[in-house]
């Protein structure tokens, strides 16, 4: 008996959902909330999507460059203060290697990003 009630209630819920879904249709209305005036007042730039994405990627890659630079400086500090300890020297060498590889990867990613974004922004421009 409980299975039958579950089935009936499920069917009823589906039917009501279908009826409500069919009876309420949405009509798009254009509402002007004054965002254009806010943009003018705030003097925001009118960058394209490609330029905005490029700016964000450039900022992120710049921050990553700073992280890798700090990592290399820290590795040099560890090596300089190792005092002949083989463990500290190995740790410093590993950090230095990882930092240099990270900088190389980051610079490559930056170069590829700049190439792709410059190609996207100049695409279709004959000249």
Image (cartoon, grey):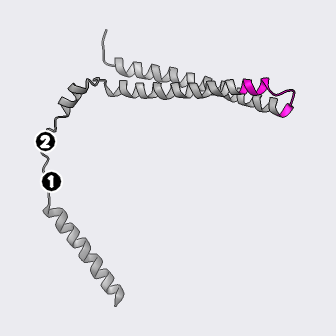
Q: Which contiguous range is marked in magenta?
A: 75-87
Write the residue at 16% across / 39% down: 33
The residue drawn where x is 45% and y is 28% is 57
Look at the numbered discs 2 and 1 and tell me whether their residues touch, using CB distance below 8 Å. Answer: no
Judged left or right of residue 97, residue 30 is left
Pinpoint residue 11: horizontal percent, then vertical percent: 26, 76
**Where residue 78 sits: x, y (%)?**
76, 28
Identify residue for label 2. 30
Are there few (<14), some (14-19), or many (20+) residues within 10 Å of tag 2? few
Q: Confirm whether the magenta stretch covers residue 86.
A: yes
Between 42 and 121, the residue placed more toward the observer is 42
Element assignment for label 2: loop
Dot in front, 2 or 1: 2
SS majority, magenta:
helix
What residue is rendered at 29% in x and 23% in y?
45
**Residue on which disc 1 sits:** 26
């Amino acid at each position: 008996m409980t299975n039958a009630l579950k089935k009936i209630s499920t069917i009823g819920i589906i039917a009501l959902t279908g009826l409500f879904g069919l009876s309420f249709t949405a009509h798009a209305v254009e509402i002007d909330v004054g965002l254009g005036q806010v943009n003018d007042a705030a003097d925001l730039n009118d960058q394209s999507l490609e330029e905005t994405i490029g700016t964000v990627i450039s900022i992120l890659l710049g921050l990553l460059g700073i992280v890798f630079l700090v990592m290399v400086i820290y590795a040099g500090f560890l090596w300089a203060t190792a005092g002949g300890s083989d463990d500290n020297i190995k740790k410093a060498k590993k950090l230095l290697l990882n930092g240099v590889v990270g900088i190389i990867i980051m610079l490559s990613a930056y170069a590829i990003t700049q190439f792709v974004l410059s190609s996207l922004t100049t695409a279709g421009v004959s000249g």
